[in-house]
Image: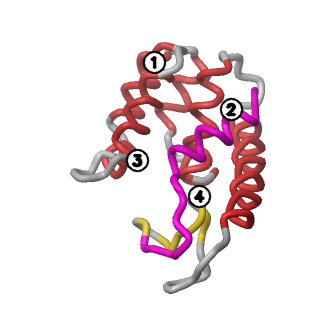
Amino acid sequence: MNKTQIVAQLHLDEGFSAQSFWDNEQWTYGYGTKAPGPGKFIYKEEALKALTERTDLAIADFHDIYAGVVMNEVREHALVNMAFNLGKTKLRKFSAMNTAIRAGAWGTVAFEAFNSSWFKQLSKPGLKTIERAERIVWELLTGERG
C-alpha cells in the first residue's frame, strides 16, 4: 500500500475548500475534513495535515475491516478511499460487498458498490463526484487503475 499515492488521490477527489459547507450529513472543509460548524475556515497547511491524519485513520480502518484478505494494491487503495469517504462504521455495513471481498468475488464486489447508497449519493446530478464513484467501482472490478 502506497500512502503517498492514496493521499494524492484523495487530494484530487476531495478538492479543497477553505470555508465550511454542508456535505450530505455534516459541515466539511479542507480536504473532506469535518468542520466545527458553518462559517468556519481552515488554512491549506492545516487542511493537508488533517488529510494526512485522516488518511492514516482510513488505512487503519481498512486493515481492521479486511485483515487477512489478500488483494492487489489498486483494490486496497479503492477501499481506503471508501473508508476515508464513509468512515469505518458505514463501510462495515456493506455486508454483501464485504462478504464478496473475503470470497475474492470482485464482480459481486463491484456490483454491490455500484448499487449502494454511497454510489447513488456520489452520483447525484451536477456533482463531479460521479467520476470518483465510477473509478472506484472500476478499480474494485478489474484491479486496474481507473
Alpha carbon distance from label 2 to label 1: 20 Å
Query: Which numbered disc, 3 or 2, marks the residue closer to the eye?
Result: 2
Q: Amino acid at mark 1?
A: Leu
Alpha carbon distance from label 3 to label 1: 16 Å
Instruction: Give the number of the disc on residue 5.
Output: 2
Alpha carbon distance from label 3 to label 4: 18 Å
Residue occupying image coordinates x 31% and y 52%: 127
Q: Which residue is mark 4?
A: 31
Residue occupying image coordinates x 35% and y 33%: 114
Q: Locate the N terminus by quadrant.
A: top right
Judged from the image, the secondary structure of the residue bearing numbered disc 1 is helix
Q: Which residue is mark 3?
A: 118
* First of labels 2, 1 by sequence position: 2
Judged from the image, the secondary structure of the residue bearing numbered disc 3 is helix
For the residue pair 87 and 14, the one nearer the viewer reads as: 14
Question: Badges 2 and 4: C-beta atoms under 8 Å apart?
Answer: no
Question: Badges 1 and 4: C-beta atoms under 8 Å apart?
Answer: no
Crowding at label 1, few (<14), some or many (≥20) Cα neighbours within 10 Å? some
Q: Amino acid at mark 2?
A: Gln
